[in-house]
Image: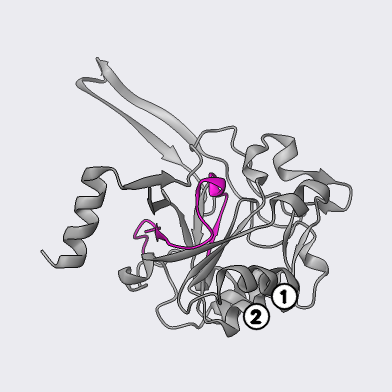
């Protein structure tokens, strides 16, 4: 075992490192994104009991499950968006597994999101964070903390007559993150874009620009308030779905205690 791996294993054994679960529990009530009615809709999670130590199977219990690739806490692959449809190795089963483990930084936007449901992550917010914590390192995950995950039900989607209202990045913010050559971008909301992201140019800039550049997305995260601004390690392997555009997954972060 290499020295670095041995040190990680020892830190976990001693309790000087801990694992933080950034994943919501999958259940039928967890909200999913709602698109205009003319479009196909994302399916909620459903679970059907097959047997439970009974006449259907005396020694085992199991379930059939159905859900969309983008239900619950989930991963977005480049081919999820039209801009990334021709990105090489852009499906979840084609991505180098080394991409699923890497450093993570957390930009705390919780105060702004508490004041404004449509709070924007802008270059100014990012540069203010960098002035305090240093430049975002190349190939890092960037997570936008808003504490939105503490909401539930209708408050989580926050729908109005003109659509959803939730915080997210501006096109200029995504441009800056791409200039930092990040690995991917994650949020606590139902998508990586703001609820009103259709009004930006380009529409839904996180999806359009990130996936067009071969980057990844994570959404419906939780417990970002338990992570430090820098120094944690993110572990986010999606299911290996052939040709998959995304996948529900369990997102974990290793943090030094």
Question: Which region shows up in magenta?
Answer: 217-242
Q: Is residue 78 magenta?
A: no
Secondary structure found at label 2: helix
Name the residue at 52% across, 69% down: 184
Indicate left or right for 167 with 78 as reference.
right
Above-or-below relation of 102 to 60: below
Q: Determine if residue 160 is in view.
A: yes
Q: Which residue is mark 1?
A: 123
Contact (Cβ within 8 Å) of mark 2 with mark 1: yes
Q: Nearer the viewer, residue 34 or 146?
A: 146
What's the CA distance linking mark 2 and mark 1? 7 Å
Q: Position of residue 35 (x, y in %)?
A: 72, 54
Residue 19: give x, y in percent of width and height.
36, 46
Q: Does 220 lie within the magenta span?
A: yes
Furthest toward the front, the residue is 132
Q: Is residue 237 left or right of residue 136?
A: left
Point out residue 111 in the picture as x, y percentages from the top left corner. 74, 50
What residue sits right under mark 2 in the picture?
176
Using the image as rendered, state which of residue 163 and residue 38 is in the foreground: 163
Number of numbered discs overlaid on the protein picture: 2
Asked which secondary structure carries label 1, the reply is: helix
Relative to residue 243, is residue 153 drawn left or right? Answer: right
Q: Quadrant of residue 239?
A: bottom left
Q: Residues within 10 Å of mark 2 (few under 14, many from 20)?
A: some
Q: Is residue 69 visible?
A: no
Q: Which residue: 40% across, 78% down?
A: 89
Earlier residue among tags 2 and 1: 1
């Amino acid at each position: 075992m290499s020295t670095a791996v041995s040190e990680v294993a020892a830190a976990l054994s001693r309790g000087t490192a801990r694992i933080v679960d950034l994943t919501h529990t999958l259940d039928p009530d967890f909200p999913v994104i709602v698109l205009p009615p003319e479009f196909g809709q994302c399916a909620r999670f459903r679970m059907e009991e097959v047997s439970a130590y009974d006449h259907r199977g005396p020694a085992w219990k199991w379930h059939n499950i159905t859900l969309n690739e983008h239900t619950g806490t989930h991963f977005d692959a480049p081919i999820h968006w039209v801009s990334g449809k021709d990105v090489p190795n852009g499906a979840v089963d084609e991505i180098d597994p080394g991409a699923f483990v890497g450093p993570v930084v957390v930009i705390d936007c919780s105060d702004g999101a508490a004041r404004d449901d449509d709070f924007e992550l802008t270059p100014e917010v990012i540069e203010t964070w960098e002035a305090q914590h240093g430049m975002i390192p190349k190939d890092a995950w960037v997570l936008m903390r808003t504490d939105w995950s503490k909401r539930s039900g209708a408050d989580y989607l926050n729908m109005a007559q003109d659509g959803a209202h939730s915080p997210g990045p501006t096109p200029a913010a995504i441009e800056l993150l791409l200039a930092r050559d990040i690995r991917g971008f994650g949020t606590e909301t139902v998508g990586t874009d703001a609820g009103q992201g259709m009004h930006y140019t380009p529409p839904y800039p996180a999806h359009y620009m990130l996936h067009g550049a071969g980057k990844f997305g994570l959404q419906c995260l939780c417990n970002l308030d338990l992570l430090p601004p820098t120094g944690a390690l993110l572990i986010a392997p999606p299911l290996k779905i052939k040709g998959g555009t995304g996948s529900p997954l369990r997102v974990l972060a290793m943090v030094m205690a």
